């Protein structure tokens, strides 16, 4: 490292004496937006930008696969509320970002993805590593830019950040041809600030909502991930502290009300809690905040909360009425809408008493037969031991549902999961992004033996940067959620789910220079959690669980949430 440092310093000094290049404008524009960390992987077309990075003040995290760069930037954004930034070269570098971009799009996460492109003069000729990433990404971005003039770069980047973070957040792509990144700029186009304004709630809609709430006898507060995206968490908490409405949340809404709140009854939907699903089915009114009636939450839409009127608050008007008609629609600024609702404590004491009884009746039982590790009990104990600093960066599979059902979350940014896209391989890169963003938090990646193999190479990234991420790997030697569905709905025809030939994951982690240990018995749980949380650096707990354990309850496909299957 020291041997090449003088060259870098000389280059930086030389560059300062001449007009900046397009690549240098990218770096300075990112700094102007408050960017501190970027995630990426270099290559031919993006090399001018990497040439401008040393000495720039930006911290670059070299991942080992571009998909991981996008996932890490996604989690960084979820934790900080600022747009995450990922960088890749043209061709396969850009296409490898696409899954992570789609993930951010589905979950409304602000992200800036910068891709290298072949020189403008050869675009359209099938040049080496040329791909139309602008066209390929259009369905999964909020906006795209193809840079045509280097002098426009500061304005483009300022606009990209404004688009990514305003309204309903989302990813923005900037495709940067190599020759434009290399060209020198004498006259930089001035940045024209765009006045941003949010739509204020309609007073008449607020009055209608208040009327419905006051007349309701069985209201339910239905919380989605949009509340956190709108920075309306405190507004919602204050509202419900006064109103006292029993509440449920979607997968991505977990933590908006702390899971230990007296009014909170857990996640609804396909793998939601029985009490949560039952109280929604009995409701006469749903106050829906930042949720989109996703099919995993509603089950069969025709049978979802059949007797309930709907008040729908959302920053995106397109979501209101898309799946379920709203009796009162309140599009626009969600925080302002919640602050405008003045209803006080509702006269629903009988309903509250009934819902409390439902919650007590259907409280989860952490006893399980045998001496093996019971994943739900392990996760419950882990999150309680970690306390309010706990952050779960979760992969996709059975363990994802167990985390949602059984972990304790004090805030929405404590639960990082691939909700809309359901992308395996999210866990480790997301954990890295979250831990770099919030180094004092106790960030734990919860993964499975299927998911971890999607991006296991990022153990090298953890090691290189000393990211003190904790990893809980549940190993059932199967693609567990697929196996569960094949057992229940495909007559036990177990097709291509057997992972009998898994490696010893603890040995794999140690080969990357990461401390690791194995857990196979329930009586080892407490000691394992203590070791996991108290190890100062990165550590992996390889936890063997019963291959036939299923996630319960479960709403079968095509059924209403009233038709739950149980253990």
Image (spheres, helix red, strand yellow):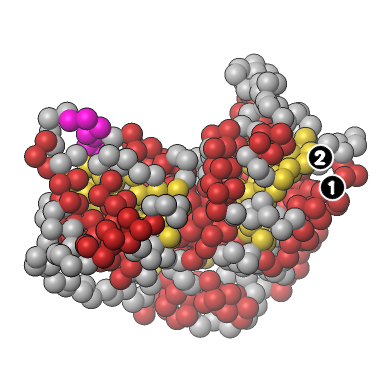
- Given residues 331 and 461, the one toward you in this image is 461
The x, y position of residue 155, in whole percent, is: 19, 65
Number of marks drawn? 2
**Residue 321 shown left or right of residue 224 in the figure:** left
Asked if the stretch drawn in magenta spans residue 293, the answer is no
For residue 118, say whether it is visible: yes
Secondary structure beneath disc 1? helix
The x, y position of residue 512, in whole percent, is: 63, 39
- Given residues 347 and 103, the one toward you in this image is 103
The x, y position of residue 267, in whole percent, is: 63, 54
Q: Residue at x 14, y 64 (%)?
A: 19
- First in sequence: mark 2 vs mark 1: 2
Residue 502 location, quadrant: top right
Q: Residue at x 67, y 45 (%)?
A: 514
Marks 2 and 1 in Cβ contact (< 8 Å):
yes
Indicate which disc residue 519 carries.
2
Secondary structure beneath disc 2? strand
**Residue 448 shown left or right of residue 177 in the figure:** right
Q: Residues within 10 Å of mark 1 (few under 14, many from 20)?
A: many
Q: Residues within 10 Å of mark 2 (few under 14, many from 20)?
A: some
Q: Residue at x 59, y 54 (%)?
A: 467
Q: Where 243 falls versus 353 (above or below)?
A: below
Q: Residue at x 81, y 55 (%)?
A: 530
- Given residues 100 and 230, the one toward you in this image is 100
Q: What residue is pinned by disc 1?
A: 525
Q: Which residues are magenta?
A: 127-137
């Amino acid at each position: 490292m020291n041997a090449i440092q003088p060259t870098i310093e000389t280059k930086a000094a030389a560059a300062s004496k001449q007009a900046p290049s397009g690549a240098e404008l990218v770096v300075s524009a990112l700094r102007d937006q408050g960017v501190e960390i970027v995630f990426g992987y270099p290559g031919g077309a993006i090399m001018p930008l990497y040439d401008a990075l040393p000495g720039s003040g930006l911290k670059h995290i070299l991942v080992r696969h571009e998909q991981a760069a996008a996932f890490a930037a996604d989690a960084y954004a979820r934790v900080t509320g600022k747009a995450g930034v990922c960088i890749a070269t043209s061709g396969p570098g850009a296409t490898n970002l696409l899954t992570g971009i789609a993930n951010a799009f589905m979950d409304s996460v602000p992200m800036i993805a910068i891709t290298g492109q072949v020189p403008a003069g050869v675009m359209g000729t099938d040049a080496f590593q040329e791909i139309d990433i602008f066209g390929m990404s259009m369905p999964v971005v909020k906006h795209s830019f193809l840079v045509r003039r280097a002098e426009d770069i500061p304005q483009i980047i300022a606009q990209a950040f404004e688009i990514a973070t305003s309204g309903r957040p989302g990813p923005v792509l900037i495709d940067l041809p190599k020759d434009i990144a290399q060209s020198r700029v004498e006259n930089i186009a001035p940045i024209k600030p765009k006045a941003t304004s949010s739509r204020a709630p309609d007073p008449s809609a607020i009055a209608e909502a208040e009327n419905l709430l006051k007349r309701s006898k069985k209201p339910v507060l239905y919380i989605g991930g949009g509340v956190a995206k709108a920075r309306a968490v405190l507004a919602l908490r204050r509202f419900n502290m006064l109103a006292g409405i029993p509440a449920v949340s979607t997968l991505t809404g977990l933590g908006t009300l702390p899971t230990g709140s007296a009014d909170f009854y857990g996640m609804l939907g396909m793998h939601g809690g029985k009490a949560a699903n039952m109280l929604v089915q009995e409701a006469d009114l749903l106050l829906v905040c930042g949720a989109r009636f996703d099919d995993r939450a509603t089950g069969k839409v025709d049978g979802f909360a059949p007797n309930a009127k709907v008040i729908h608050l959302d920053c995106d008007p397109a979501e209101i009425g898309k799946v379920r008609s709203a009796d009162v629609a309140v599009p626009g600024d969600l925080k302002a809408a919640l602050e405008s609702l003045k209803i006080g404590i509702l006269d629903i004491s009988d309903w509250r008493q009934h819902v409390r009884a439902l919650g007590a009746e259907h409280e989860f039982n952490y006893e399980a037969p045998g001496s093996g590790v019971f994943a739900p009990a392990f996760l419950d104990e882990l999150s309680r031991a970690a306390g309010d600093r706990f952050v779960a960066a979760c992969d996709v599979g059975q363990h994802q549902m167990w985390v949602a059902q059984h972990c304790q979350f004090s805030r929405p940014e404590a639960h990082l999961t691939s909700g809309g896209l359901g992308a395996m391989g999210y866990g480790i890169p997301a954990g890295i992004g979250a831990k770099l963003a919030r180094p004092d938090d106790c960030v734990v990646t919860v993964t499975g033996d299927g998911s971890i193999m999607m991006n296991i190479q990022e153990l090298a990234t953890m090691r290189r940067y000393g990211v003190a991420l904790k990893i809980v790997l549940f190993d059932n030697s199967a693609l567990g959620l697929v196996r569960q569905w094949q057992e229940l709905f495909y007559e036990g025809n177990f097709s291509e789910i057997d992972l009998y030939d898994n490696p010893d994951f603890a040995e794999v982690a140690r080969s990357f220079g990461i401390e690791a240990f194995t857990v196979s018995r329930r009586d080892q749980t407490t000691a394992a959690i203590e070791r996991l949380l108290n190890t100062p650096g990165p550590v992996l707990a390889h936890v063997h669980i019963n291959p036939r354990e299923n996630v319960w309850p479960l709403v079968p496909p095509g059924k209403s949430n009233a038709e739950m299957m149980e253990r």
